[in-house]
Amino acid sequence: MNYSKFWITVNDIKQYIYCPRIPFYNNLLSRTGDVTYGMLAGREFESSLNKSLLTKLFEDLIYDGYKLVKDLILFSAKSMLRGKLDYALIGRHKAYPIEVKYSNNPGIYKIQLVAYAILLEESLKLKSTKGYFLYKYSHIKMKLSCVKITSSDKAKVIHIAEMIRANIIAGIRPDPTESRAKCNFCEFRNFCDDIF
């Protein structure tokens, strides 16, 4: 078996941006991290959404022939990426990822949208040049944000996937995030003996 090419998840890409150690731990340890408050709140927010609300938010695209699809599982043998997308707008020639976030700053998750755009292009053969965040935080009203996705954004995702693979193959734990404040909310905080 060629271990230089194995599946990397979209979640691994997202977590790498938060801290490069998280995908290393996720892929090498038999135990997954603890579920955080943010994870639980995000799941609750997503489960509160209904299709009629989403259809109304994207009515112009749906009117133009796009179909709203929930929980789309995507794989790409080309980039060896896989993931489960919250929602997608699928058209005849284009597709757009939609991610639901419990956050007041969904832009920090752009890399995740970009990874899903790659998966839509490679697995469905549809162009994907933008994506959407549907988000809310605490008592803030739900908002919709459109994000442009460029070819350099996509190249960054592929580079991150290669870095994750290289660290895992070499068995080298990457350096932690520079922001120690993130460590306080990390599901793997107990694994970083050089920090705590």
Image (spheres, grey):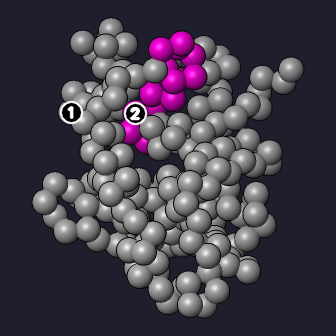
Please tell me whether residue 61 is drawn above or below residue 120 in the rendered image: below
Q: Rate crowding at label 2 as few (under 14), some (14 to 19) or many (20 or more) other CA atoms within 10 Å.
A: many
Residue type for callout 1: Ala
Q: Is residue 189 visible?
A: yes
Residue at 70% of width from left, 73% of height from top?
A: 127
Vertical relation: 138 (above or below) 175: below
Q: State the image coordinates of residue 41 (x, y, percent, origin top left).
A: 27, 45
Query: Residue 36, position in %: x, y?
Result: 29, 32
Where residue 151 sits: x, y (%)? 63, 65
Q: Which amino acid lies under the numbered mark 2 shown in the image of this protein?
A: Cys
Residue projecting furthest to the right = 1
Where is residue 27 drawn, in percent x and y? 57, 22
- The verdict on residue 26 being magenta is yes
Residue shown at 36%/46% (left/top)?
A: 43
> Which region is colored magenta?
17-31
Q: Compute the Cα span from label 2 to label 1.
A: 11 Å
As rendered, which of 184 and 57 lies closer to the eye? 57
Image side of residue 155 versus residue 14, left or right: right
Q: In screen coordinates, is 43 left or right of 37?
A: right
Residue 19: mark: 2
Does the magenta segment cover residue 98?
no
- Residue at the image point whose x is 50% and y is 73% from the top: 148
Reading the image, the residue beneath label 1 is 181
